[in-house]
Image (spheres, helix red, strand yellow):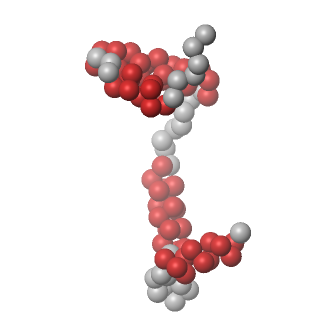
Amino acid sequence: MEGQRSYEDILALAEALSPQDVSRLVCELSKFLHDRYGKWTDLQGVEEVREYLEWLRFRDSRHLDSRPKSPEEFLAELQEER
């Protein structure tokens, strides 16, 4: 039995496929993932999640008086949370 191939080897093989074989591979992988994990996700509500994450990023990158934090301040704050 052949050893497990690296990601780079598999990617090189996939990149060498014809467009028709790439299409077949995508269909097979999609079926495999659906069988293993069920429906991937319903995209409804993604915009609300994106807006929430952008708000968190904005909030965490600013001081209480709305001044932007320096990268050093931001990283120091992350270290304190640990």
Is the N terminus in the top left, top right, bottom left or bottom right quadrant?
top right
Residue drawn 57% across and 74% down? 75
Farthest residue, direction bottom: 65
Q: Nearer the viewer, residue 32 or 79?
A: 79
Residue 40 in the image, given as x and y percentages of width and height: 54, 33
Q: Is residue 14 visible?
A: yes
Q: Residue, x 51% and y 61% (percent of image)?
A: 53
Say above or below: 67 vs 60. Answer: below
Residue plotted at (54% across, 37% down)? 41
Whole-percent x and y of residue 26? 41, 22
5 to the left or right of 22: right
The residue most toward the top is 1
**Residue farthest along the left direction in this orientation:** 19
In the displayed orientation, state which residue is furthest to the right: 82
The answer to whether any part of residue 62 appears in the image is no
Q: How many marks?
A: 0
Nearer to us in this view, 5 or 42: 5
Residue 70 image offset from top left, x and y in percent: 48, 81
Q: Position of residue 2 (x, y in %)?
A: 57, 14
Q: Is residue 54 left or right of residue 80?
A: left
Q: Is residue 12 above or below residue 48?
A: above
Quadrant showing the C terminus: bottom right
